[in-house]
Image: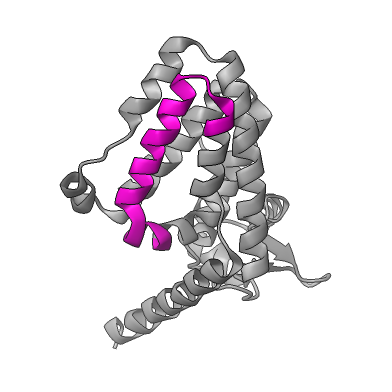
Amino acid sequence: MVSSVDRAYQALRAMAVDYRLKPGAKINESELAQQLEVSRTPLREALNRLSSEGFLVRDGGRGFRCRAFNAKQVFDLYEFRCELEVAAAALCCARAEDATLAGFEALCETDAEVLASLPAAELIDRDEAFHEAIMHACGNDEMLRALRNLSSQIRFVRGIEREHRHARSEREHLEIARALMERDAGTAGSLLRAHIARRQDEIVEVIRRGYSRIYMAEAMQGLDMK
């Protein structure tokens, strides 16, 4: 049976991942407790968990705020993810069984028509599944846990990115899969670095589009309620 803390945590995490909790906004605990139909104690436990995972920040002694949505933070997350996955690729080449490495290619879909027909959420799920498969194959559970947390924190940004580069991303996945199958850690690492790394100016543009989407959705919701 799911506890009230876990239920509140899952609901709030989903809201934080796609920025239904607005960037930098103060968390109204009374309002959220009523909305989620939980008491303040389990809500506070859920908020503390989200704070420890980087989704919320403490607002001094006055509660919590939703994480900021700024270029420095997103750049740092991408930089961390890049180093983590390059290290995982090397471990994967050294440790994974041949059958596991051969299976990566099956996770890649390069048919442009098929990709164009998939909803954005499914494209992101496919992308995360490919990268998690590599991390799982490297055999380090803590690295896998770190990647999952990182992926959640940048999921909104990745969704905006993949609207314009889903076919290219899948081709890059295929190249990475083939390098791993050949146990070529150097090439796999270089391909992953090129695939993941983002320049600061690219991140600034994605964030600009992200803010537009967040507040446009809020405006449209307001119109629907009239």
Q: Quadrant of residue 47?
A: bottom right
* Residue 133 drawn above or below residue 221: above
Q: Is residue 94 left or right of residue 223?
A: right
- Viewer-nearest residue: 96 or 117: 96
Q: Residue at x 61, y 16 (%)?
A: 94
- Viewer-nearest residue: 186 or 60: 186
- Viewer-nearest residue: 157 or 79: 79
Q: Is residue 99 left or right of residue 17?
A: left
Q: Quadrant of residue 178?
A: top left
Q: Position of residue 208 (x, y in %)?
A: 49, 77
Q: Position of residue 191 (x, y in %)?
A: 50, 40
Q: Residue at x 50, y 34 (%)?
A: 132
Looking at this view, name the residue that lies furthest to the right. Answer: 61
Q: Residue at x 54, y 15 (%)?
A: 96
Q: Quadrant of the C terminus?
A: bottom left
Q: Residue at x 61, y 45 (%)?
A: 82
Residue 88 is one of the magenta-drawn residues: no
The answer to whether any part of residue 175 appears in the image is yes
Residue 174 is one of the magenta-drawn residues: yes
Q: Which residues are magenta?
A: 160-187
SS assignment for the magenta stretch, majority: helix
Q: Position of residue 71 (x, y in %)?
A: 62, 69
Q: Number of numbered discs present?
A: 0
* Residue 26 drawn above or below residue 150: below
**What is the image's colouring?**
one colour
The answer to whether any part of residue 66 appears in the image is no
